[in-house]
């Protein structure tokens, strides 16, 4: 009967013992601010809505695509290419002969955008901003779950970068919405919504990058109390403390009666030894 060979124990991967960090309270607060800015730009009435005069102009005036045959000099007819000339600063829609209706610059750009097939652009931007709000909310919930759920080092290694990636996706979506809106309706007066969306997008990019850096290299963005915590819980210091000899009770009366003026280095041992390990996770500020 063949002798069964002993099972070899699989050595644990050291990558799970590398210390990966989580986002701190300041980053979570900035994520909350970004989420609030994106929500404000989504629900603000004048962000993607036009005035009633624009809609009335769409149905009250007819701008044909071509010039009527034999009536090329009539002011009632105008081509789309002539009306949507990008070099013009004053736009007019013909009503009858020698009577024209002045059109605002932003209204004219809206009319030209509809003709060019961008009628669904406001809905597209609404969908982009709603998706950005969803990803930002997921970032906030995921980061809070990692903090409150007491994750292991392996869980931090596998899922610690997910909130940063989700926030980066939200920033890209918001930037796409801004680019689409400014390309087609750059002259539309939307007030503080563009400024808030731009501020939220820039903040989201910066926070996402800082969260990714903190996850991979936690010591870079750590405050002093966090740096001490990282040293206490690191793999290298844990192995060193395990190999350190255990202190025994003094065997002689001479060793027990140490003088009061004993040097501090002799009492503490090697000054390069790591501080004692702790079992509780200090609150990060």
Image (cartoon, rainbow, N blue to C red):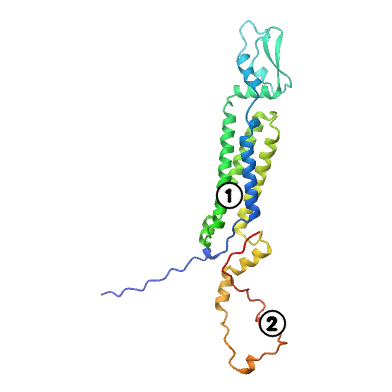
Query: Would you say residue 3 is visible in this rendering?
Result: yes
Q: Where does the N terminus fall, quadrant-wise?
A: bottom left
Q: Earlier in the sequence, mark 2 or mark 1?
A: 1
Horizontal and vertical percent position of residue 137: 57, 46
Q: Identify the residue at horizontal 31%, vertical 73% (top origin).
A: 4
Horizontal and vertical percent position of residue 52: 64, 22
Residue 90, relative to residue 180: is it above or below?
A: above
Q: Where does the C terminus fall, quadrant-wise?
A: bottom right
Horizontal and vertical percent position of residue 11: 46, 69
Q: Is residue 2 left or right of residue 45?
A: left
Q: Which residue is mark 1?
A: 140
Horizontal and vertical percent position of residue 169: 58, 44
Q: Residue furthest left?
A: 1
Q: Identify the residue at horizontal 57%, vertical 63% (top origin).
A: 19
Real-space Cα separation, disc 2 to disc 1, in angstroms: 47 Å
Q: Residues within 10 Å of mark 2 (few under 14, many from 20)?
A: few
Q: Identify the residue at horizontal 65%, vertical 65% (top origin).
A: 227
Residue 43, relative to residue 278: is it above or below?
A: above
Along the viewing direction, whichever of 158 and 282 lies nearer the viewer: 282
User: Quadrant location of residue 46?
Assistant: top right
Kindly identify which numbered label has been placed on residue 265. 2
Residue 116, relative to residue 151: is it above or below?
A: above
Q: Residues within 10 Å of mark 1 (few under 14, many from 20)?
A: many
Q: Secondary structure at mark 1?
A: helix
Marks 2, 1: nearer the viewer: 1
Q: Secondary structure at mark 2?
A: helix
Q: Residue furthest bottom?
A: 253
């Amino acid at each position: 009967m063949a002798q069964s060979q002993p099972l070899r124990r699989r050595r644990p991967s050291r990558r799970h013992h590398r210390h990966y960090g989580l986002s701190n309270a300041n980053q979570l607060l900035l994520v909350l601010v970004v989420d609030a800015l994106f929500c404000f730009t989504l629900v603000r009435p004048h962000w993607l809505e036009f005035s009633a005069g624009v809609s009335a102009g769409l149905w009250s005036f007819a701008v044909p695509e071509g010039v009527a045959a034999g009536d090329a000099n009539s002011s009632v007819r105008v081509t789309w290419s002539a009306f949507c000339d990008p070099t013009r600063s004053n736009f007019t829609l013909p009503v009858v002969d020698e009577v024209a209706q002045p059109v605002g610059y932003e209204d004219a750009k809206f009319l030209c955008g509809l003709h060019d097939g961008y009628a669904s652009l406001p809905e597209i931007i609404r969908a982009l901003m709603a998706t950005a709000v969803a990803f930002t909310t997921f970032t906030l919930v995921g980061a809070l779950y990692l903090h409150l759920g007491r994750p292991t080092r392996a869980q931090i290694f596998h899922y610690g970068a997910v909130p940063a990636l989700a926030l980066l996706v939200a920033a890209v979506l918001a930037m796409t919405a801004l680019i689409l809106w400014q390309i087609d309706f750059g002259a539309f007066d939307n007030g503080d919504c563009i400024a808030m969306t731009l501020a939220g997008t820039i903040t989201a990019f910066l926070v996402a990058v800082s969260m990714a850096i903190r996850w991979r290299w936690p010591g870079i963005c750590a405050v002093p109390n966090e740096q001490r915590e990282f040293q206490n819980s690191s793999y290298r210091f844990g192995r060193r403390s395990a190999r350190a000899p255990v202190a025994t009770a003094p065997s002689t009366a001479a060793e027990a009666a140490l003088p009061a003026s004993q040097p501090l280095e002799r009492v503490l041992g090697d000054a390069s030894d790591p501080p004692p390990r702790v079992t509780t996770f200090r609150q990060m500020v």
